[in-house]
Image (cartoon, rainbow, N blue to C red):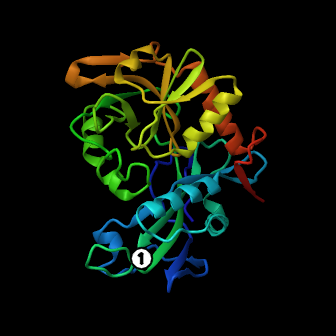
Amino acid sequence: MKEIDWSNLSFGYMKTDYNVRCYYRDGKWGELELCSEETLNIHMAATCLHYGQEAFEGLKAYRGKDGKIRIFRPEANAERLQSTCRGILMPEFPTEMFCEAVKKVVKANERFIPPYESGASLYIRPLLIGTGAQVGVHPAKEYLFVVFVTPVGPYFKGGFATNPYVIIRQYDRAAPLGTGTFKVGGNYAASLRANKMAHDAGYASEFYLDAKEKKYIDECGAANFFGIKNNTYITPLSTSILPSITNRSLMQLAEDMGLKVERRPIPEEELTTFEEAGACGTAAVISPIERIDDLENQKSYVIAKDGKPGPISEKLYHKLRAIQYGDEPDPYGWVTVID
């Protein structure tokens, strides 16, 4: 195997040795299978291709200073996948099997787990698709669950540094009572155009307001938003936001640090009052927000006045990463350790 330059990895795909698969046929899930094939052989009339019966998850494994491998909150990902399954009528994949599949694929690809302090981690991508042939708009009768892994570097090139965002009003990521709360590919396809517009204009990502009234903060691209002021961690409450496991974890940590936690609608104009703000998710953990530009109304909400991440965001970021890497105790039972 060619030597991997761990410290210069992009957030992209690299071929690894194995993936894990499981088939749903005749009303039940089969056994977990280890597979070295990178491609899927599916029917051209599969429901995932025509009607978007497709769900995925994203989580990471880390190598600690002690050499042990830690997987962050796989049970929470299993539960979120089950919620998506209920939303788009796919059979739920059991939590125990999900965790077993994740452990199996991580162990089988152990040589691809980046070393401690390289700034890289092993990204884990579970995928569930409708494979049964169907021409009418109906759920499939057969499904395939796959988990593959790939080593990745930081999501944003600068790592933990502030980034500018831009409000895009021309497009919505998801409707208020649509599939926004489910992790389906369609939500991401719907964001591609707005994301390209933001990147082309020199921004880290696009920033969405609520689809109904365009008054309230929704999501930052593919990440949840949080703002900090008056010793309070505030994150939007909305029927179109994906419930982020990272955001859930940060809320818990914020509470334990003595911050008040609020989940509520956040009007756009409240952006002027935040002392700190960030986008949070599995890929970046926290991407601190420097400013959010509203080009349509010729406004700029500057949050990081000195261009640096705020002290609370920094504390939350380092605390969460310390738990993920095993540098600090895990009082919440979030981490699954693989010896």
Residue at the spot 44% in from the left edge and 62% down from the top edge: 55
Q: Is residue 39 above or below residue 175?
A: below
Which part of the image, by quadrant, shows the N terminus? bottom right
- In this orientation, which residue lies closer to the viewer: 116 or 21? 21
Q: Let me know if residue 271 appears in the view.
A: yes
Residue at the spot 55% in from the left edge and 50% down from the top edge: 5
Q: Let me know if residue 4 appears in the view.
A: no
Which part of the image, by quadrant, shows the C terminus? bottom right
Q: Is residue 166 above or below residue 26?
A: above
Residue at the spot 67% in from the left edge and 44% down from the top edge: 324
Does residue 61 appear to the left or right of 282 in the view shown? right
Q: Percent position (x, y) of residue 72?
A: 65, 50
Give the total of numbered labels.
1
Residue 285 lies in quadrant: top right
Residue density around tag 1, few if under 14, some if 14–19, many if 20 or more, within 10 Å: few
Q: Which residue is mark 1?
A: 40
Q: Percent position (x, y) of residue 216?
A: 35, 29
- In this orientation, which residue lies closer to the viewer: 193 or 214? 214
Q: Is residue 8 above or below residue 88?
A: above
**Kind of residue indicated by mark 1:** Leu
Does residue 270 appear to the left or right of 113 in the view shown? left
Residue at the spot 42% in from the left edge and 67% down from the top edge: 89
Q: Percent position (x, y) of residue 197?
A: 24, 38
